[in-house]
Amino acid sequence: MIVSKLAQISQEAFAGFVSPTKIARIYGTNPTINKNPARTERALEMVTIDLLYLRLLMSETMNIIYHIIMFVSMVKNWKNYVNIYNMTKRIRFIILVICVVLFFVVSPYIVVYSLGYRIDFEGKKITATGGINVRALPQGAEVIVDSKSGGKTSFLSPTVFVQNLLPKKHSILIRKDGYFSYQKTLEVKEKEVTRLDQVILFKEKISFEKLADKTQSPFAKQEQFFIKNNNLYQNNNDKSVLITKNIIAFDVYQNNIYWVGKDNLLYKSDFSGTNKTQVFESFYSPVKNIKISPDGQKILFYNDNEILYSYLNSKNSEKIFLNRFSEKIGDCFWLNDDYLIFNLGEKIVISEIDNRDNLNMVNLSQTLLPADKIYLDQQEKKLYISTKDDLLLSEKLIP
């Protein structure tokens, strides 16, 4: 039916007689009689679809016919394509030998290559390779390994995996416009994946707003626990209740209190101060303050010039040294489980805790005066700055 209608339209189209009225008449509508423009428009849509369908059908048919003709022509003249019968036995034997040699030479290399082995030209040997897996924020961060782009992170895939790397040290650069770059050199081992899972790129310009309502200030809130004369107290209905004596620093995590005593040992107890247990057999001295990480797995401790941390659930109290500064360290906070934020003189510094190779640190554009204080809102990931006259609040620090 479609073909017959299209044939009639085609004949009249070539003759220059196609009009909406004739098209509508062919498709069973008459705009002159019915005076219904909608039906005429529908008829035009139908003929357009049919013409497109016919064009596609004719195109595919001609394509098939063309390939059939080419195949028949090739079969008919196959001797012109493969003229093996005009070759001498010697030539055919030489070709066979070359093919066999190529097979035995190339096949092992293909098999070894598929298994992840590569030629180490520096070591002059064939060795198994490894890889580097990078997880970075924000999305759109480009990962470059040994000056070659390995890909970009995205909303669907925040990780980039670079494989087939020779077992040696490889330089890694992670960058994005408007953000501080991240650089580290890591060693890749045979048949292993080196992980760099917690990379965060921070904005080069973090904006701060001035808060008119100073009642939002976290500096004005009364702390539940406080130290007075080296004793730890708890505010309980406007009364100060003694928890324990002779302490230097403390931090609260969930329903436990961690503190460093004057004997330079780390202890843990409940809020009443009973059920006291010693966390480490030995600790670090001198300590100005301690902070428990958000996941409760690590403890940060620092003094005026040094920052270190340890794992709480570790059997030994290994102290992981992060950095030593000539300037005085003020307040220090866990930004998340893998980054710290602290003030160093007039600077506000964000530092990673991954001390493999170099330690990546960035300085915020906002500077401080000696009397200024900082406080991190752990949930919102925003930084408060208390100055002499103003209260400032940053935008969210982590993308």
Image: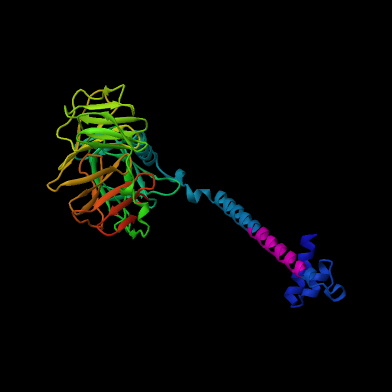
Viewport quadrant of the N terminus: bottom right
Front residue of this view, candidates 115 and 73:
115
Residue 104 is at least partly visible in this image? no
> Residue 160: x and y, percent?
37, 44
> Residue 129: x and y, percent?
29, 36
Front residue of this view, candidates 375 and 221:
221
Left/right of residue 279 with respect to residue 134 in the rendered view: left
Q: Main secondary structure of the magenta part?
A: helix
In the rendered picture of this protein, how many numbered marks are placed on residues?
0
Front residue of this view, candidates 187 and 360:
360
Left/right of residue 240 with respect to residue 30 in the rendered view: left
Picture quadrant of residue 55: bottom right
Q: Residue furthest right?
A: 33
> Residue 142: x and y, percent?
34, 51
Q: Is residue 110 above or below residue 348?
A: above
Q: Residue furthest bottom?
A: 16
Q: Residue at x 19, y 35 (%)?
A: 229
Left/right of residue 81 with respect to residue 18 in the rendered view: left
Q: Is residue 221 magenta?
A: no
Q: Residue at x 37, y 40 (%)?
A: 95
Picture quadrant of residue 4: bottom right
Q: State the colouring used for the structure image.
A: rainbow
Q: Residue furthest left?
A: 326
Q: Is residue 24 above or below residue 91?
A: below
Front residue of this view, candidates 325 and 125:
325
> Residue 389: x and y, percent?
27, 60
Picture quadrant of residue 21: bottom right
Magenta-drawn segment: 41-59
Residue 58 is at least partly visible in this image? yes
Q: Is residue 58 magenta?
A: yes
